[in-house]
Amino acid sequence: MSTSSDSKDLPPIVTLLTPAERTRVDAIGEGYYHALHRENVDDVIRDLKSREIQAVLVSVNCAGVHAGRVASLVREFPRVPAVALLSELEAKTPHAVLALGQSGIRRLVDVRLANGWRELRGALMADSVNSSQRVALGQLAVDLIGASADCLTFFEMLFTCSPRISNVRMLARHLYLLPSTLMSRFFRVGAPTPKQYLAMARLVRAAWLFENAGYSIANVAYHLDYSSPQSFGRHVRAHLHMTAGDFRARYDGTGMFERFRAELILPHLNALRILRPMVATPGWIRVESTRTYGSE
């Protein structure tokens, strides 16, 4: 069995389930996710606002009581995957399934079937990289055709790493590099700095989160590990010259990602195609050890 400490390192899902369903969901999720079992939708919404949730799982058996509030949840948090669970068939089940469908939940897993529990685990884990991230990373792979594998890995990490990685020092540590080494490799090819890429990628991630109407500016600041909403506001103003409220009104995730591409990718394709951010090239060791390139 996983320890409590281990479970905290797993992606969390939040559930509205019967006691019997909770036991099975915990069992199949061992080592894959950490289930937070709640009694009502208000508690689920509090979890969504206070932490990054992988998915929401709702039992068909709970639909009759919670269907109206589930509809509000799906409407306010459309970017958080919601899955319905069918574990038994009763007279009220067809009506409950219809109610969940009308609430906006589009995926139902029938665990009465032989492979149902395995399918459920796959459904809950399928969005560890969300749909917006997949689209963004796919576009970058097209933009950077001919770039090195570790260059592509660097950009993938910008959009999928822990929000706690918020500065170049932490980014370099995550890549097992010295900050000066990482910065010098971008400098040598004439690309923008790692700090610029990280700062703008964090704003793209913020714009994705703001697509969930249920998130306040404070919620987004918390999710992205800013020290306060004011700190997030200063970051937005420094890089976009607007308030956090204006940023939310002006940019969705797609719009902010297109700005990222327009400013930091497309004008620098030649440099990025020769960039090796995580692999040294001949002649760099001496230069990196004797020169300092900017600050974090």
Image: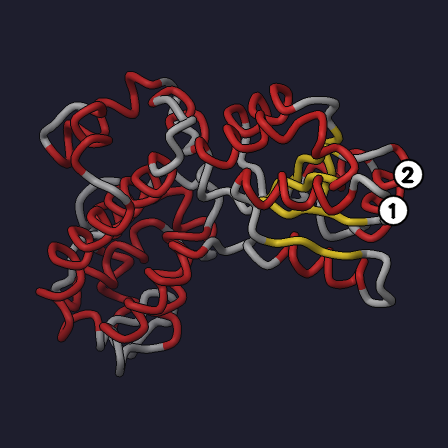
Left or right: residue 294 compared with residue 226: left
Amino acid found under the numbered disc labelled 1: Arg
Residue at left offset 78%, top offset 62%: 118
Query: What is the crowding at mark 1: few (fewer than 14 residues within 10 Å), some, or many (at least 20)?
Result: few
Query: Residue 207: where, in percent of width, then height?
Result: 30, 40
Percent coordinates x, y for residue 259 in the rendering: 15, 51
Q: Residues within 10 Å of mark 2 (few under 14, many from 20)?
A: few
Task: State the image quarter where residue 167 is shown.
Answer: top left
**CA separation, marks 2 and 1?**
7 Å
Which secondary structure, mark 2?
helix
Residue at 84% x, 38% y is 22
User: x%, y% of residue 248?
Assistant: 24, 31
Residue 226 higher or lower than 168, as above or below: above
The quadrant holding residue 69 is: top right
Q: Quadrant of residue 220?
A: top left
Q: Nearer the viewer, residue 247 or 284?
A: 247
Residue 130, compared with residue 8, is above or below; it is below
The secondary element bearing badge 1 is classed as helix
x 35%, y 38%: residue: 211
The residue beneath circle 1 is 24
The reply to whether discs 2 and 1 touch (Cβ–Cβ < 8 Å) is yes
Residue 247 visible here = yes
Q: Mark 2 belongs to which amino acid?
A: Ala
Frontmost residue, 237 versus 255: 255
Name the residue at 56% across, 51% down: 106
Which mark, by number, is residue 20?
A: 2
Q: How many marks?
A: 2
